[in-house]
Amino acid sequence: MKIGKVLITEEEIQTELKEMGAQITKDYEGLDLLIVGVLKGAFMVMADLARYIELPVEFDFMAVSSYGSATQTSGVVRILKDLDAEIAGRHVLIVEDIIDSGLTLNYLLKALKVRNPASLEVASFLTKTGIQRVEINARYTAFEIGSEFVVGYGLDYAGLYRNLPYVGILEEDSAT
């Protein structure tokens, strides 16, 4: 399997994350911000985005699964790793690699809202347009893409390709 097309370059990613980081810095100035990365996909986005946020922030991680090794969400969400930090009264920003059906993130938002954070917002690296089964209003979105299956920059196919510094599309016959 190999990459058929580069969809978003490394330079485009860093430019957009720098702008997003500046906006987050402005929006959360003076607040107790906890950034929650959704593993495994968001680890690269979160690391680079955090470097552009000019505030003292705390980090935590959650791991959820709705894909397995498939290219489409199963709709069944499992929490594989929960937060270590208490979020009551805190401003929580979830960093997500990609929003497609919205089912996983919707489940996660509901699970965290009952823990009474002061605010709960989403920063999504990618949002697939036109395929949401549940509408998710991310406060920050780096890129909107179509329905194509993408890999790279934290996104995988069967556990591979996360290490690419760009976002690409597998060759047509590669993802079947």
Image (spheres, rainbow, N blue to C red):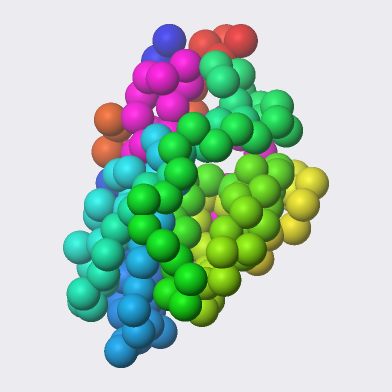
Between 9 and 73, the one nearer to me in the picture: 73
Q: Is residue 49 left or right of residue 155?
A: left
Q: Which residues are magenta?
A: 140-162
Q: Is residue 143 left or right of residue 105?
A: left
Residue for point 47% across, 16% down? 158
- Relative image position of residue 164 (x, y in whole percent): 29, 32
- Relative image position of residue 13 (x, y in whole percent): 34, 53
Q: Is residue 74 above or below residue 114?
A: above
Residue for point 26% across, 70% down? 57
Residue for point 25% across, 52% down? 47
Q: Is residue 104 left or right of residue 63?
A: right
Q: Quadrant of residue 73?
A: top right
Asked whether 148 falls inside the magenta stretch, the response is: yes
Q: Is residue 8 above or below residue 73?
A: below
Query: Does the image show residue 144?
Result: yes
Q: Quadrant of residue 173?
A: top right
- Relative image position of residue 110 (x, y in whole percent): 67, 57
Residue for point 48% across, 71% down? 88
Tell me which secondary structure the magenta stretch mostly adopts: loop
Point out the image quarter for the C terminus.
top right
Query: Does the image show residue 9?
Result: no
- Relative image position of residue 41 (x, y in whole percent): 42, 38
Q: Is residue 151 above or below residue 105?
A: above
Q: Is residue 161 above or below residue 31?
A: above
Between 101 and 85, the one nearer to me in the picture: 85
Between 30 and 175, the one nearer to me in the picture: 30
Asked whether 57 falls inside the magenta stretch, the response is: no
Q: Quadrant of residue 155?
A: top left
Point out the image quarter for the N terminus.
top left
